[in-house]
Image (spheres, rainbow, N blue to C red):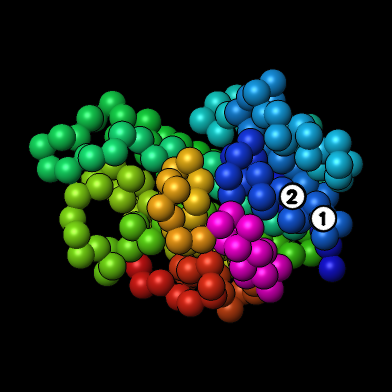
Amino acid sequence: MSGTIMITGCNRGIGLELTAQFAKDGWRVFACCRDLKKADELNALQAKYPLIEPIQLDVTDYEQMIALSKALKGEPIDILLNNAGYYGPKGTGFGKVDREEWRRVLESNTIAPYMMAETFCDNVAASDYKLIAMMSSKVGSIADNRSGGGYIYRSSKTALNQIVKSLSIDLHDRGITVMALHPGWVKTAMGGPGALISTAQSVAALKKLLTQAGQGKSGRFYNYDGSEIPW
């Protein structure tokens, strides 16, 4: 089966690979990124797969988000995948936290994904799949935190996980499934060259999770391999 998926953060890494793999399988892809003029790989991919529709969207620009929702009014979106995010400064241990950067990370990783869900939930509800997925991270798991530190990024993903849980309850009666995903430690600009898996490996597994999701998986947190991660 195929449908329509909206993905944020499509100019590189996991978002670009998600765009490629879904388009290859015949999905219509609303591929959002912050600056289309600099998205050379995405634009080249669109030339190969006409089902890809590149869209300029800065997820922290809420006026731009609302304008896009008006342009897509009545358009079913089977899967809304909030992939865009910002790691922030590294080495944010105790005593080294930059408050302004913390606010910027929370805006990108926590508030913006919520706003995407709120803004496009009618489109998702009008679809067949009815799925909203948030790209979280295992470092956001409180139960899994054994090393401390990482206050900025960890807290943004922990807060995102709480949003997933609340959305799964609030949108249940509309038939919408909401889930959090951990893509694994992936060889991207964020993950670094020492990461364990490629973007292709991560996305192939994520795609399987996304296309087989149902309300039984709503309000839960999954590793890319399908195993559940404790909150």
Q: Judging from the image, what secondary structure is the residue with disc 1 in?
A: helix
Location of the N terminus by quadrant is: bottom right
Q: Residue at x 61, y 68 (%)?
A: 205
Q: Amino acid at mark 2?
A: Ala
Task: Give me the C-alpha separation between circle 1 and circle 2.
Answer: 6 Å
- How crowded is the residue under tag 1: few (<14 C-alpha within 10 Å), some, or many (20+)? some
- Using the image, tell me which numbered label, if any, was put on residue 184: none
Look at the numbered discs 1 and 2 and tell me whether their residues touch, using CB distance below 8 Å. yes
Left or right? Give the position of 230 relative to 212.
left
**Residue 107 appears at what percent x and percent y?**
42, 35
Location of the C terminus by quadrant is: bottom left
Q: Amino acid at mark 1?
A: Lys
**Residue 74 appears at what percent x and percent y?**
82, 45
Q: Residue at x 31, y 34 (%)?
A: 89
Residue on which the image places disc 1: 24
Residue on which the image places disc 2: 20
Q: Give whichever of 129, 29 is nearer the camera.
A: 29
Q: Residue at x 20, y 65 (%)?
A: 146
Q: Give whichever of 159, 40 is nearer the camera.
A: 40
- Tell which residue pokes out farthest to the left in this image: 95
Q: Judging from the image, what secondary structure is the residue with disc 2 in?
A: helix
**Residue 121 appears at what percent x and percent y?**
65, 50
The answer to if 180 sits in the magenta stretch is no
| Residue 53 in sight | no
Left or right? Give the position of 135 relative to 210.
left
In the depicted structure, whether residue 152 falls above or below residue 167: above
- Tell which residue pokes out farthest to the top in this image: 37
Q: Which residues are magenta?
A: 198-212
